[in-house]
Image: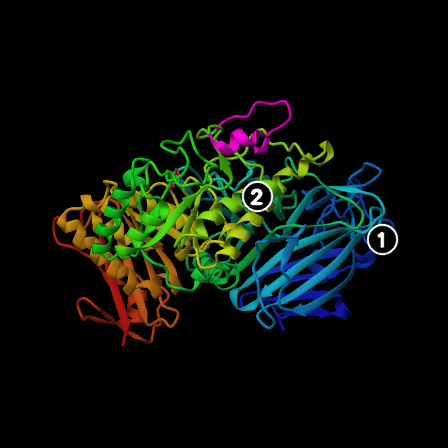
Amino acid sequence: MPILFQPENQLFKLDTKTSTYAFMVHEQNYLVHLYYGPKIPDTQLKHLMYRGWYDSLSPRPRGMEDRRFSLDSIPQEYSGTSNGDFRISALEVRGQAGDTVTDLRYVGHRVFSGKPGLAMEGVTMPATFAGEGEAQTLEVETVDAVTGVKAFLLYTVFENYGAMARSVRLENAGSAPVSLERAYSLCLELPTMDYDMVHMYGRWAKENTVVRHPLQHGIQAIQSKRGMTGPNHNPFVALAREGTGEENGQAIGVNLVYSGNFSMEIEVDTLGCPRLLAGINPASFCWRLEPGQSFTTPEAVMVFSENGLGAMSRDFHRLYMDHLMTSRWAKQKRPILINDWEAAVFDFDDQLLVEFAQEAKKLGVEMLVMDDGWFGARNDDSHGLGDWRVNEDKLKGGLQSLIHRVNAAGLKFGIWYEPEMVNPDSDLYRAHPDWIIQAKGRVNSLSRNQCVLDMTREEVRDNIFQQMADVVGSHNIEYIKWDCNRNISEAGNLQLPPERQGEFFHRYVLGVYDLMGRVTQAFPHILLENCSSGGARFDAGMLYYSPQIWTSDCTDPIERLTIQFGASLCYPASSMGAHVSASSRAGFQTKGAVALMGSHGFELDPRKLTQEEKEAARAQVQEYHKYYDLTHYGDLYRLTDPAVHPFFCDWAFVSPDKNQVLFTRVVMRKPENYFQYRRLAGLDPEKFYVDQETGDRYSGALLMNVGIDLSQPWPGPEDGSSVTKYFVAE
Ligand code: GLA
């Protein structure tokens, strides 16, 4: 069993295929962290808590004689506040007396099969799921004696994925109200600072730039205060040991299953010991708990890898596909789509869309997605958001007739929504100006001419749900693109009392989850694709509802390489919406090869393609089908990093049985010489693989140790060209 409690050592040991995680109950019921790393057989681990001898400046709990025990240095399982531990704290509770001393002690625990769902005030929160026998869960009960607040620490072990999911349920079991000033999902202690922090930063149209730097003494953090995830930082951090590469070395990945204000911070203390916290950003957060009330933190997922960042990513990918995505489309073949946005923007009518459908059909495309501009008075981005009724001036005969004609052309039909938003110039806003997020007495800033609807309010969610259900429920709509094109400023809530304003941001996220849950449950046949000005809400919270997320508004295939490589650090390739567009850099073949790294689609005017491009597009659709299982359910190997290599970007998908390999090279710049080999990874060394184009036969061992010959005669490969090779084992 992956979870062991050993009473003689008061030790908890949680094992996955790759790792051991251990902590113990020490004297006075302190919960002390001991170990997280490669799998070990030991059960005598108590000595790992001590980090020197302390007296002045470092407090010691009364009755604790051992000078090695000061909370100033002891690794904590879930750290409190002002109890002698001066590092960043996971939990801070303000009690009735007004102080924030928070001091948790162990009470008891239970272990059970499967995994409980997470919920807050009746809203199901996105989280990994597991049935009986698929995972094991440990719940540890702790209490702060003075406030009576209980913290239940939850650990679910996904043994075969090298993963653990963690969250905390806080209950006010005291007799007076308390305020949660901070309530992180996860606290992780490590004994040495010889790690690099790896994370993704970005901006609109340039998401997921991976950065890697050694941990420093002091606090380093990535955060969002935007109300949503944002493109600036993704809620993912990996700690990679010095020397860890794609396929070698130790790495710990931590990802939050959350779509709002987050904080992932690491403090390296004077001793050189890092503490990592992941959870809701304490900035602008404060949650009041009346006696008897409880608060559940979002979930954080940890993966431990001994075989580099690549193996870590592949475990995240598989875990998320098997145990996070709730959509039936996670495992069901998705139609290849064409989206009209880049080709038409707001300037389209029913006739144009039908022509798109007819032309796209000839390429083999299976679904037309009508993007922004189909509703209300929406002819540019300053009108109409909130009025989800079809604009019949544009779409003559209405939606019924349009969908009928698109279906008659042989395509399914998908539609765009931005449910959380409203333009001041809309009927919805005119009828309910109080429904937008606003701080009392302040003038709202606009972003893209729009305001954010207050999703904490039930009547707002009901209205939007009803508007969506009226359209989706009465038409043959098979896909929704759920967009979100601004972040939250002047945050306030007209309904919450002043002492509860700190709850607003999290309540907003819960409101969004509630609405998304309602929509996906009412229309389970819908393929939902999330989007936020591209990939500004590309997170695990969204993956719970939508198996596919629009990765970026940048569709330039060369730029896309770093964007998609970055996203794949944590998120499955199949979840990355990737379209071939009319962008000018690189040829049509390369655009297709890059789109095939994710969920391939088109975003162009199919009428304007040259004959040659049409043939290439037709071939790409066939490849989409041919390689679907490989690209959607296979293992991704990032072989040559486009952010580091001067010329190439290489990757490969390997089928789980290691019988098929799809290798792709994109030439970003002409290399300096013609002689080029590239080693593959993840093959079976004993198997023989046949190049399906040339018939050449190589062992997996040879392909992994020497590689494939990619040399080309003078003048060598062109900038922006690409090579794809498909191998099948004999
Ligand atoms: C955002 C999306 C685009 C498109 C537009 C429509 O920018 O990322 O794909 O849907 O909105 O307004």
Instruction: Answer with left or right where residue 365 lies relative to residue 257.
Output: left
Instruction: In the rendered view, tell whether residue 702 sits above or below residue 468.
Output: below
**Residue 217 in picture, x, y percent from top left:** 59, 41
Instruction: In the rendered view, tell whether residue 635 sits above or below residue 220.
Output: below
Whether residue 258 is visible here, answered yes or no, is no
Instruction: Answer with left or right where residue 685 lies relative to residue 63.
Output: left
Q: Amino acid at mark 1?
A: Glu
* Helix, strand or loop at mark 2: helix
Mark identifier at residue 85: none
Circles 2 and 1, Cβ within 8 Å, touching? The answer is no
Quarter of the image containing the N terminus? Answer: bottom right
Which residue sits at x=26%, y=52%?
592
Give the extent of the magenta segment: 426-446
Residue bearing the label numbered 2: 461
Q: Amino acid at mark 2?
A: Arg
**Residue 456 in picture, x, y percent from top left:** 61, 41
